[in-house]
Image (cartoon, helix red, strand yellow):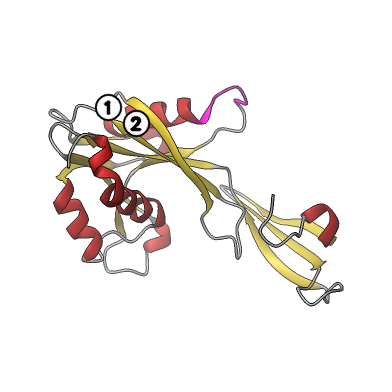
Amino acid sequence: MTTNGFTRARDVEIVEQRVVYQGFSRLDIVRLRHRQFAGGMGVIIQRELLMKPEAVGVLIYDPKRDEVLMIEQFRVGALSESNPWQLEIVAGLVDSVDEDETLEAVVCREALEEASIELRQLQKLMSYFMSPGGSNEKFTLFVAQADLSDAGGLHGLPEEGEDIRVTVLKSEVAFQALMDGRVSNAPALIALQWLMLNKQHLGIA
């Protein structure tokens, strides 16, 4: 179902799509035209399309302690910022090699690798595109509960260059970090905003 009545099969014509770079991510050049809102097909346009694996993330919350688990790690995309270490939620990429692994299984694996935390009451919240103007990257957000009484420390897989610090924050402290602009990546922004609106349903009014 679409909101505008358009579909890719009927209303988008791919003239050419070719790979120009293949590394950690893939970059395609796409030439296409698509149907216009006023009717008829538009002119051929060219776009660079960054192809990335699907990603998942989880907001980890302890309702008894009213605490949120956040992680900090270096992000090359924030290199132009004064502090390229981002305050994030636990997240990871879906391995296309293992087609039998569910999104829920990926989330649980990432929570163990990045924070040594076992999740309970895992719930899918939403799926969304991270930056559809130039990338196909899709992100699925979950929420889960966990005992955060002993959470913290340094984690990650050294062989993958991961250097992750786990931080546990009272929910109000996390919300203030959001309002102060200290949370500047979409998954964490959306997750914390969701928690602000729905915390009462997770055990704390």
User: For residue 16, what is the image quadrant?
Assistant: bottom right
Q: Residue at x 51, y 31 (%)?
A: 103
Name above or below for residue 37 compared with residue 79. Answer: below
Q: Main secondary structure of the magenta part?
A: loop
Three-letter amino acid code at disc 1?
A: Ile
Q: Position of residue 3 (x, y in %)?
A: 66, 59
Q: Residue at x 79, y 58 (%)?
A: 17
Q: Is residue 54 left or right of residue 169?
A: right
The residue indicated by pointer 2 is: 111
Q: Residue at x 28, y 59 (%)?
A: 183
Answer yes or no: is residue 185 visible: yes
Name above or below for residue 24 compared with residue 150. Answer: below
Q: Position of residue 153 (x, y in %)?
A: 18, 35
* Residue stretch in magenta: 98-103
Residue 109 located within the stretch drawn in magenta: no
The residue indicated by pointer 1 is: 117
